[in-house]
Every structure is written in structure tokens, then in C-alpha cells.
Amino acid sequence: MLWGLEMTTATRLDETLRFLRSLLLTPSPSGYPDEAIALVEDEILGLDLAGASIERTRRGALLLTVPGSSDLHPRAVAVHVDTLGAMVREVKSNGRLLLTQLGGYSWHAVEGENVTVLSVTTGERFTGTIQTDHPSAHTSRAVREAKREEDKIEVRLDIRSLSHDDTIAAGIRVGDFVFLDPRPVFTETGYVKSRHLDDKAGVAIAYGALAALSAGKVSPSQTTRFLFSVYEEVGHGAAMGIPSDTEELLVIDMAAATVGEHQNSDEYSVGICAKDSSGPYDLQMRKKLTLLCERNGIPYRVDTSTPTTLPTAPPSSAPAEMRVWDSSGQAWMPATPMSARISTASGPHWTCCWPT
């Protein structure tokens, strides 16, 4: 149920999965949002959402406003289009590329991954593979023993390049974007396996809800804004762009963990996060979410989340109203007119602000 809209298993699932596949195949590491945002915008414009308006923020995010039966208590839904990725840090003397991460992940998780390097200067794209600087077990023991650290990881390009000058001549420069291959697989048993389901699966869920509104020719009970942010993976996703009159915010993001030690989430339930390392989230909102699940037969699990990093204070440049930490968006959220009390959920996975 989306604030009063009854949704069944026939809620345009095929259309939502088609959208998800297209989005997964569209690169969007933090800092490179335009292709994915254009795709999302085009898809939304293809829906019949009476009275809806759409705009781009200065930061490149997409803000959709869907009029409701009432606009007395405006609500918002936030998802993020950006994903993990990398950028060229150095063109090495052997023609290979040293990387710097966009977002935080383990180098183990991308070793052996195929990538595409986008030349920001020319627009040309080059494929390659992430590997260690000693990738062969036949020639070096380091392949088993060496730590996977930034200075030991490189991209070997699929071009004939044996030197720094060869790679530069091809058009690759420091600051070029590196896209990790998503490798999406949609199985006959109903599973989706892919990189970047964080948070493109969440974006697809938001799109599916909008498609349901369109198909049913109905409006939400309150005017609702949908923010598709583009900088979540680097720490300031929905910190900007939420209209100031928003009274309730729902953030759809990935679960805290489904296989981690001491985690209660699983892949078959909505995960409602009760706290992170900053403290508990709003109990009223948590109860509201669990009640929605129970009334509509939606499996759910309450879980807790401990972010790997948590600032001790808002950024010094943040305006006075930005005082609430969103562990999903990894950013300080507006505390007014919303309360500093927060509730989150993960898994299609929500982080919510509740009015005072």
C-alpha cells in the first residue's frame, strides 16, 4: 500500500523489471548521473500521472511532484540513482590505470571485474579488466598473499598500450570515469542478480509505485514528491532537494545486511530499521510501517544498522536546518519542519522522517 493505494501482485511487475534491467545497464557512478537520470525522466514522462510536474535540481537530481487528494501534509519518497564506481587516478608507466574509488567497497569485490572507461575529454569508451599488479599464480606468489589495496590494483585496457604515452594517446586521462560491469541476471526462479541493485532496485520500486498510480488512475492521499538523488554513495544523497514543507520522508534503499552477523534481515522481507549507531529511529513511524505490512500481508523484519562511518557533527557548510543524520543516504537531513526523530527501514528499505 502506498499511502492509501492498494497494490496487488499484478502491479505491473513485468514493466518494473524491464525498467530495472534498463537502469542497471545504464552507468551512473557518483558524479556521472546524466544518462541514468535521463532514462528515469523519460520513463516517468511516459506514465499518465495527472497534474504531475518534474524538474532537475542544481545538483542533477530529479524531483517529481505528484498531486494528492490533499496537500495539507506533503510527503516525499527518496531513492538514489548513483552507484559505486571508480575514477582514473593515474596513468601508469606500463599503460595501465591506477584507480580511486567512488563510494566505499572492498577491492576484493571488484578484482577480475570487467569495466568500461569513459574518456571525459572525447566521450570515447574503452573496455578493460580490474586486476592486481601481480595477477598470475604461475609467476608470482603475490596473487595469493598480497593485500588488495589501491596501489596494488590496476586496470588493464583492451587496447594495445605498453606505456603511459600509449594510453594518453588513446585519449584516457586522470579523472576519467570507470564503470563496473553490472552483469544483470534475471533467473527463471524469480531472482535478480546484479551489481548496483543498491539502489537501482529501490529506484525500480519507486517507478513501480508510480506505474501503479498511473495504471489505476488514482492519486496519493497527500501530495507526494519523489526525489531521485545522485550523490548518495559519496555521502550527500538526499541532503539537498527535499522541499522544505515536507512532513514525512520515506527513503527506499538496500537492507543493512541479509547475511551479516547479528542481522535480522533477509532477502524475502521488507526490513524496517529500528536504529543505527546514532541511536533509535522514530517509534511512531516504525509502528506505522509494521502495521502497513501486517494489514497487507507483506513479510517484514525489524533490524538494526551500524554505519561504518558517522560524522560527529554536520558539515560546517551545512545550513542551520540540516541536523538529522540519514544512515541510508549517509548525509545530514533537514530537521525542520521535520522533527529530529527519524525512522528507517531497509530491504526495499525505508528511512523516514516524522512530523513533530
Image: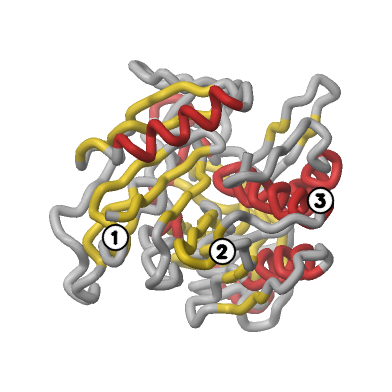
Q: Nearer the viewer, mark 2 or mark 1?
A: 2
Query: Is label 1 in a helix, a strand or a loop?
Result: strand
Q: Which residue is more in the foreground, 227 or 97?
A: 227
Residue that appears at 36% across and 58% down:
235
Residue on which disc 3 sits: 216
Which x, y percent locates residue 340? 23, 54
Query: Is label 3 in a helix, a strand or a loop?
Result: helix
Residue on which disc 1 sits: 332
Q: Is residue 182 above or below residue 304?
A: below
**Residue at the outermost left position:** 312
Between the residue at mark 3 and the residue at mark 2, the CA separation in whole angstroms equals: 18 Å
Q: Which amino acid lies under the numbered mark 3 shown in the image of this protein?
A: Gly
- Residue neighbourhood size for the residue with mark 3, other residues' Cα within 10 Å, grouped as few (<14), some (14–19), many (≥20): some
Which x, y percent locates residue 252? 52, 46
Residue on which disc 2 sits: 70
Between the residue at mark 2 and the residue at mark 1, the CA separation in whole angstroms equals: 28 Å
